[in-house]
Image (cartoon, rainbow, N blue to C red):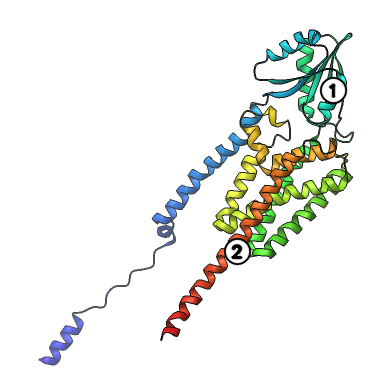
Amino acid sequence: MSATSATTTGTASPLPDRQPPPSAAQQSASPSHLRRIAVVVVLAPVLAALALWAFAWPAARTAPHDLPLGVAGPATATAQVQKQLEAHEGAFEIHRYADEAAARDAIENRTVYGAVVVTERGPELLTASAASPLVAQSLQQAVARQSGGAPLKTVDVVPASADDPRGAVLTSSVLPMTLAGIAAGAVVTLLGLRGRRAVAALIGAAAVVGLVAALVAGTWLGAFTGSWWSEAAVLAASTLAVSAAVAGLAALLGTPGIGLGAFVMMLLGNPFSGASSAPEMLPAPVGTIGQWLPPGAGASLLRSVSFFDGAAASGPALTLTWWSALGLGAVLLGSALKRRKESAPATTGREPALAG
C-alpha cells in the first residue's frame, strides 16, 4: 500500500511547464521598445522644426536692423538725406561725419558699413564689400531709390578679394570650422582622453585645422587678403572655441554633452552667425546672440583680420578666448572630478580592513 501510494503521489505531481521564450514579435512589441519608437517619432519632427526655425526664419527676415550708416557733408546739405534714411524706421543707425575723409576712416575702422556723401555733383555712396557684399548691394538699392533713379556714384572703399568678390568662400568657411570643432571635441571624448592630454589634443587639432583651412581658403582659393599667419590663427581659434566647448560639456555631463554642444554650435551658432549677410541684417536678438557664439565671432574676426587690418577685432577675439578658456577649464575640471570619483571606492574599501 505504501509503495502504491508513493507511486501514485509521485505521478500526481507533474513538473511545472516551462514557458517558451518570447518571440521576436513579442519582444518588439514590449513597452520599452514602444517607448523608444515613440521617442524617435516625436523627436525627429521636433528637431526638424527647430532646424527650420534656426536656419529659415533669420533668412526670411533678412533686412537692415539698426545698420550703422554714415552721412557726410555740411549739415544743411545732408539734412534731407538723413531725414529720408531715418524714414525707414529701425533700419539704419545714422552717424554724422563732416566730410568724405572722415566717412572713409569710419568705414575702414568698421564703425559703419557705408556712408552717403553729399557733394555738389549729387550724392555719392561709399561701401565696403569686404564687410558684407549683401549690405553693400542693399545700400546701393536703398540710396538709388531715394535719389529718384538718378545715376549714383558708388565707391568700394574696402573691396572684397578679387578672387572671391561675393565673399562666398568666407561665408562657406563657417560651417566647416564648426563641424571640425564638433568632431574634434567628440573624438577626444570618445577616445577617453582626459585632463592635460585632452587639452593638448584639442589645441593641436585646432592648430592643424587652422593651417589647412588657411591653405585651402587663402592660398588656393584666394579669398583672403591679409596676413596668412593671422588668418590661420583666427581659423584655429574658431575651431578651438567650438571643440573646447563640446569637450568641456562632455567632461561635465558625459556623452549627452556632445549632443548639447553640437546643438548649440550647429543650430544656433551657424545660422545666427550673420556670415552671409551681417549681424545687423538679422532680426533681433538673433544677430547679437550669434556674435556671442564662436561661429559668429570667428566670422567677424576673420573679416577684421583679413580686410580691415584688425579693426574692431577685440570684441570677437575676446569671445573666442572666453569660449576656449571655459571649455578647456571644464575639461580639466571634469577630469579631476572623475579621478576623485574613481578613487573614492578604493579608499572606502580599505577602511574596513584597517579597522579590522
Q: Is residue 153 left or right of residue 23?
A: right
Q: Quadrant of the C terminus?
A: bottom left
| Disc 2 element | helix
Q: Quadrant of residue 84?
A: top right
Whether label 2 touches label 1, CB < 8 Å: no
Q: Is residue 281 positioned above or below 148 on the image?
A: below
Question: In the rendering, at what x and y percent does residue 93 appear?
Answer: 70, 21
Amino acid type indicated by mark 1: Ala
Q: Is residue 282 visible?
A: yes
Tell me, yes or no, if residue 128 can be seen here: no
Residue under the image location 64 percent in, 56 percent down = 329
- For residue 290, which numbered disc appears in the image? none
Mark 2 or 1, nearer chain start: 1
The residue that appears at 17% across and 87% down in the rendered structure is 7
Nearer the observer: mark 2 or 1; the answer is 1
Q: Secondary structure at mark 1?
A: helix
Q: Callout 1 environment at 10 Å: few (<14), some (14 to 19), or many (20+)?
A: some
Q: Does 102 appear above or below 191?
A: above
- Does 41 sit left or right of 286 as displayed? left
Given the image, on which type of amino acid does mark 2 rest?
A: Ser
What x and y, as percent, mark residue 206?
75, 54
Disc number for residue 102:
1
Residue identified by numbered label 2 = 335
> Residues under labels 2 and 1: Cα distance?
53 Å
Q: What residue lies at 86% left-to-right and 29% top-to-bottom?
A: 158
Give residue 311's quadrant in the image.
Answer: top right
Residue 8 location in percent, x, y?
16, 84
Q: Residue at x 69, y 28 (%)?
A: 280
Q: Nearer the viewer, residue 205 or 234?
A: 234
Of residues 179 and 199, the one nearer the viewer is: 199
**Looking at the picture, how far across and down is residue 163, in whole percent?**
89, 36
- Residue closest to the eye, 145 or 307: 307
